[in-house]
Image (cartoon, rainbow, N blue to C red):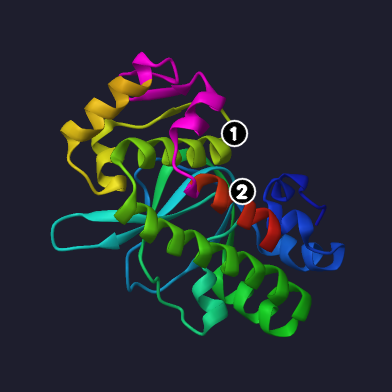
Amino acid sequence: MEADDRHRANRLIAEMSDDLQARLQPHLEIVPLTPRTVLAESGSQLRYAYFPHAGVICLMAALRKGGAETATIGPEGFVGFEVLLGSYSASQRVLVQVAGVASRLPIDILSDLARESAPLRELLLGYVRYFLIQVLQSVACNGLHSVHERCARWLLMAHDRAGTDSFQLTQEFLAELLGIQRPSVTIVARTLQKAGLIRYSRGLIAITDRQGLEEAACECYEMVRKAMNQTI
């Protein structure tokens, strides 16, 4: 089977050796990431690992009254890291936030190859270390920073991963991700739009002033971005 270079759009796959990529190639398939698609429910049996090329996948903490995002995953990472920690169960709900595309791999293939290959384990665990930093920083951010700062941070993280300046996102979904009420999101979106940082209309968000949005966000965004470059 000829190599499919599209899989290398994911940072982790791109950093794998040619031998590892060749071993994965027969089992990888390209699949779309459709917004609001649930890839795995919390506690469910994992069937696939996903390596996004573009788009945003989130992990959602399940609560009795809704839920909230704990981390985002894009082309820098993968879904299904639980198998590296000895579990085949999803730790949280896995939900597509922003449309994109991914390479999908049966989870047992990833588990078997990770056990056999020390370089692969090291590469994937490097991402897991970054993922944990992101989660811990998110906990601090949610407790210490304003909705305005948190929303700006989330939009920047989505922009980094989406591969486009514009993407579909309803206010209801953004409120769910941030764990806040819809009216609060409406106020923040209007403020950011009035400042010329974004353009928002009928569920479509366009980032119009990236630098201004970075200035509006809390320091958590830059800290997490630096951590990614240092650990992956």
Above/below status of 74 relative to 106: above
Q: Secondary structure at mark 1?
A: loop
Picture coordinates of residue 218, whole percent (x, y): 44, 42
Q: Is residue 164 left or right of residue 123?
A: left
Vertical relation: 71 (above or below) 208? below
CB atoms of marks 1 and 2 within 8 Å: yes
* Circle 2 SS class: loop
**Separation of disc 1 and disc 2 at Cα?**
9 Å
In the image, taking residue 105 as reference, residue 117 lies left or right, namely right
| Residue interval drawn in magenta | 193-220
Tell me residue 48's x, y (percent). 51, 65
Looking at the rendered image, the quarter that the N terminus falls into is bottom right
Q: Which residue is mark 1?
A: 163
Q: Which residue is mark 2?
A: 75
Residue that appears at 74% across and 49% down: 8
Q: In percent of the image, x 70 and y 52: which residue is there?
A: 11
Q: Is residue 37 magenta?
A: no
Query: Which amino acid is tagged 2?
Result: Pro
In the image, residue 222 lies at what x, y percent?
Answer: 56, 46
User: Which residue sits at x=44%, y=37%?
Assistant: 217
What amino acid type should be assigned to the residue bearing mark 1? Answer: Gly
In the image, 55: left or right of 150? right
Count residues near mark 1 (Cα–Cα under 10 Å), then give few for <14, some for 14-19, many for 20+: some
Using the rendered image of the protein, determine whether residue 79 is visible from the camera's viewpoint.
yes
Q: For this rendering, which residue is in front, 178 or 93?
A: 178
Choose top left, top right, bottom left or bottom right for residue 97: top left
Q: Earlier in the sequence, mark 1 or mark 2?
A: 2
In the rendered image, which quarter contains the C terminus? bottom right
> Is 53 left or right of 165, judged from the image as shown?
right
Where residue 177 sits in the image (x, y, percent)? 31, 47
Residue 39 in view here: no
